Image (cartoon, rainbow, N blue to C red):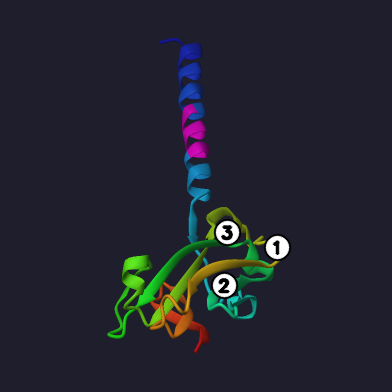
Amino acid sequence: MSGTVKKVLIGGILLAILLFGGVFLSIIMQVDKPADYEKYNLADDISVEVEDNGDVYLVRRNKAASLIFIFSYVRYSHGEYDYANKKNMKEAVGFGVELAVNRAVDTMNCVSVSKPNKTFLFNTEEYPKIKEVFYYSEQTGKEYPIWSK
């Protein structure tokens, strides 16, 4: 092979590596990950509102308003957790929420402040056994109380 062909071949291989590496990195950075309760100071930015008809809402303010509502969990009286759905909420005594943040935003620590928003969680008349709402960190297994009856 001549020197020119080798240079073009090496340049093509390097270009392919850079291209695929850039695509891979951009995909990885777009994946959401659970938001750290302490890092984002969620104690100050999330609360629960209960309306007269029994509807329970998660209220997110400031940085928490820009995070993504990702999972809801239920906790049974014996301490076991499960993902929330209408079937298993009948026996639950606690309701947990978890927020997520985009990996790129988290890495650059540039979470913006958004206007407050409310997310419907459940109705206390429909699910009377649920006595509390908490932020649940699946990574650490910790509960952070938000509201209780």
Q: Secondary structure at mark 2?
A: strand
- Secondary structure under the numbered disc 1 in the rendered image: loop
Along the viewing direction, whichever of 21 and 87 lies nearer the viewer: 87
State the image quarter where residue 96 is shown: bottom left
- At x 37%, y 66%, the residue is 86
The residue positioned 47% from the left and 28% from the top of the image is 16
* Region in magenta: 16-23
Task: Nearest to the eye among marks 2 and 1: give it.
Answer: 2
Q: Amino acid at mark 1?
A: Ser
Residue shown at the point (65%, 62%) measured from the top left:
111
Mark 2 → mark 1, Cα distance in angstroms: 15 Å
- Could you say where residue 74 lies in the image, as x and y percent from the top left? 37, 74
Residue corresponding to mark 3: 107
Q: Which residue is mark 2?
A: 58
- Residue 72 visible in rendering: yes
**Residue assigned mark 1:** 114
Of badges 1 and 3, nearer the viewer stands 1
